[in-house]
Amino acid sequence: MDIDKSLYLQTIANYMQDSVYVINKFGEELFYNNKIERFEPSERKHMLEELRGVFFTGKPSFDKYNTYRTVDHREVHMLSTIVPIESHGEIVAVCSINKNITEMTNLLNKVYKLQEQLQSYCDGRNDLQNGTSYNFECLIGKSPQMGPVIDKAKKAAFSLAPILLTGETGTGKEIFAQSIHNYSPSRSHPFVALNCAAIPETLLESMIFGTTKGAFTGAENTQGLLEQAGKGTLFLDEINSMNLVLQAKLLRILEEKKFRRLGSNHEAPVNCRIISSTNIDCHTLLSENKMREDFYYRIAVVNLTIPPLRERQEDILLLAKYFISKFNKAYGKQITQLSPDLEDILLKHSWPGNVRELCHVFENAISFSDNETTLTSAYLPDYFHKQSLAYMRPTALGNTRNQSLPQTLDELERKLIINALTANNGNITQAALSLGIHRQNLQARIKKLNITKNIRFFVE
């Protein structure tokens, strides 16, 4: 059956979140989707005139901010990209693609208000005056990898040079940033943090620099984070998410120590120190052209690399002790020690989530633990038990060449349970403890694997 291709195109366009509008050089509408139909006729006329102007300039425009009214009298905020369509060197049509950022704009305004409220609240409280929660005493570690990084960070605190913190996710980059701030002479001034990856590119610039009323439709006079930080610290987390254009603008600020709000001709001094962080090696970013080389050398006058937890084995049990104390208080528990099998699993785990993962594991384990003083591996998340199989030597599996994976795993599990029961004289409770699982779970597995015939006695 021959179906007009325009039907496919129209159906696809109608399900797009963006509005699409195409006209020819005579101003005739060639194509539009149902999002355009929601605009008031006067707004569509305004959009049409804007598109016709491209026939004369021949120049595309990107991410231009506009507001439009819909037929139900709602105001929508749009980012418009307008591009000419050429054929044989002649512009035959102009296309407008409009992204609805109304929710993003409303969210940004809420963020601004919350930041102002937070700053006002902090100004009235001495204990929260600079907006931080951590200092160097919060950095737990005695490993040879951690000590030099902390020493270097303390020395860097007394300089206003920009600092770049490099480390995997969960290594504690913001704790380092706050610690540096609280160790510096600027500790009484604000610490302002922004996760660059969490903010859309189109809003990131206005959040950092601030806006002037009339800079674009709907813009008000708002302080950016550079102003809010004052003489304190602006922490830009995951700066690798910042696009190259904004990197160039921030580079100029770092070099000239001056900035302008969006839409303003007035230059103001930059008084804060900038600390940045990235979870990707900057040399990789440079090689992939995701970071400007001049920008890198400017933000990384001091470069601190925070080691991952797998390289700090001496610190794992030290951190575990800290988290036990912390979550004992939070959940009303009385845990005082770790079982040997739990210590062994913790030391063998690769910790891809680093200290953050360790923290979450202990909060989960302690919150579900019973009224006991020893924390066992029975309370670890399920993925730890699956990984523990990988720690066993291949010889423990025997000859499994002709078996399927489920058969091999069942056989291995059967051997482990029989060995545990034999070692504990058939005591199910003690065997479950040694296997790192709950007693009820062990009973269910015994029944499933038909192990009762292989054990002469059970002690309940």
Image (cartoon, helix red, strand yellow):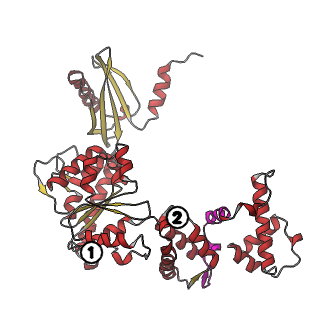
Residue at which label 2 appears: 351
Q: Is residue 221 visible?
A: no
Please state the horizontal and vertical placement of residue 120, each as a whole percent of the image.
23, 69
Proximity of marks 2 and 1: CB atoms separated by less than 8 Å: no
Residue 175, picture quadrant: bottom left
> In whole angstroms, how far apart are the C-alphas of marks 2 and 1?
29 Å
Side of 187 relative to 394 (left or right): left
Where the N terminus falls, by quadrant? top right
Please state the horizontal and vertical placement of residue 388, each as a whole percent of the image.
65, 65
Q: 243 and 350: which one is in front?
A: 350
Q: Is residue 141 visible?
A: yes
Under mark 2, the amino acid is: Trp
Residue at which label 1 appears: 183
Q: 73 and 294: which one is in front?
A: 294
Residue at the far top: name it: 88
Please state the horizontal and vertical placement of residue 448, each as a whole percent of the image.
81, 64
Secondary element type, mark 1: helix
Q: Which residues are magenta?
A: 367-390
Side of 447 relative to 264 (left or right): right
Under mark 1, the amino acid is: Tyr
Please state the horizontal and vertical placement of residue 308, each as a whole percent of the image.
45, 64
Secondary element type, mark 2: loop
**Disc 2 packing (10 Å; few <14; some 14–19; many ≥20):** some
Residue 95, picture quadrant: top left
Residue 79 in the image: above or below residue 46: below
Where the C terminus falls, by quadrant? bottom right
